[in-house]
Image (cartoon, rainbow, N blue to C red):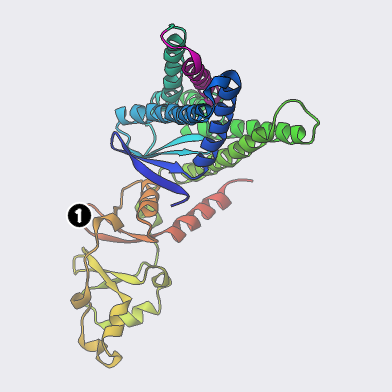
Amino acid sequence: MNGNLRVGSLFGIPFFVNVSWFLVLALVTLNFGGGLAAQFPSLGGQAWLLGLVAGLLLFASVLLHELGHSFAAKRQGIGVNSITLFLFGGLASLEGESKTPAGAFWIAVAGPLVSLALFGLLTVFSGSGLIAGPIAAIVGLLAYINLVLATFNMIPGLPLDGGNVLKAAVWKITGNRYQGIRWASRTGQLIGWSAVTLGVLSILGLSNVGSFWTLIIGWFLLQNAGQSAQSATIQEALSGLTAADAVYENSPIVSENSTLRELADATLTSSSTDKWQRFLVQDDRSQLVGAIQLDALKTIPSSQWSDHQVRDFVKPLTQDIQVQSDQPLLDAMGQLEKQGVQALAVIRENGTLVGLLEKGQIISLLRQKAQAQPA
């Protein structure tokens, strides 16, 4: 999916490789192999094999960097969905965010700290005299790359680790996490535009600084920093709201004692059934019983709809498409995305049915908040 291939698990964390990684591996192998062939002519064809090994070790370093983030997150009780290697390095996908600026800071710096530790260990090893020749050259190069990996990632702009450090710092100063994201996103966009400009000028021969890769990296920063800023705006708009606040006003709800004829009549007044294709069913105490698929109407001749009750066609709803009424709306949105559904049944703690939570209603709520804000 999305060009990612699962290659296994590490410490219980699914590990993926994006197809773009193979392009980088090929380029790194050619670059390292060519350098070794020039430096050690006696290697012959073995130089390219060693180049491949060096390339794999490079990505192992990136993987360890992402594991640093992952372990720091796990120490705070935050789950890790996956680790993915791709064109520009790696990404640890976390289930949530830190509750405090300090927690966000330690997750952000954990990766660069691992890279710095690798740099120190590899530097000591390469200078220890225990290795020589091509192996020493590879180890020295890996030490340098880990130093670059640590320092580059500490550039203070999202989506880089330094951007997350900046986010944590602004969050600590202002007390507003979303303000921190906006600052770090704007910085990331500024850095991205600078990199794109340098890359374009270099390609046109107007600057000795930058390259085609500078342009690509700048574009990557722009795209991700912009997404972070947009996400922060949405999160701030929805913060403080619960699932009950966004329940669809005319939720498709029917009593279990209703007949199929009454259900058919209700479908004519509901504008959401075309999206969810079912009605929520409640009992006499407004307790959620389950749901009835509208396809049930097709199983009985219309002339007999008045003779059959909804209760005979009810199917229970699994917990993954139910949400508590007091659950933060942001969490409910995450549940919608995770389950890949258009709507969730909203219930109170005692099982009383509140209504239907739809993606469209959340979007409508966002528009209302945007219009309410002063220009």
Position of residue 120 in the picture relative to residue 189 (left or right): left
Q: Residue at x 49, y 25 (%)?
A: 165
Q: Residue at x 39, y 53 (%)?
A: 245
Instruction: Indicate whether 278 appears above or below 180.
Output: below
- Where are the magenta residues, as a range? 130-153
Whether residue 205 is visible to the viewer of this picture, yes or no, is yes
The rendered magenta stretch, by its main secondary structure, is classed as helix
Residue furthest to the bottom in view is 303
Give coordinates of residue 26: x percent, y percent: 54, 37
Per the image, the residue denoted by label 1 is 350
Whether residue 262 is visible to the viewer of this picture, yes or no, is no
Give coordinates of residue 243: x percent, y percent: 36, 52
Give coordinates of residue 167: x percent, y percent: 50, 28
Residue furthest to the right in view is 206
Position of residue 328 in the picture relative to residue 227 (left or right): left
Give coordinates of residue 66: x percent, y percent: 41, 30
Looking at this view, is 82 or 309 the one in front? 82
* SS type, badge 1: loop
Instruction: Indicate whether 281 appears above or below 327.
Output: below
Q: Verify whether residue 251 appears in magenta.
A: no
Looking at this view, is 310 or 258 the one in front? 310
Question: Residue 294, located in which quarter of the rendered image?
Answer: bottom left
- Residue type at mark 1 is Asn
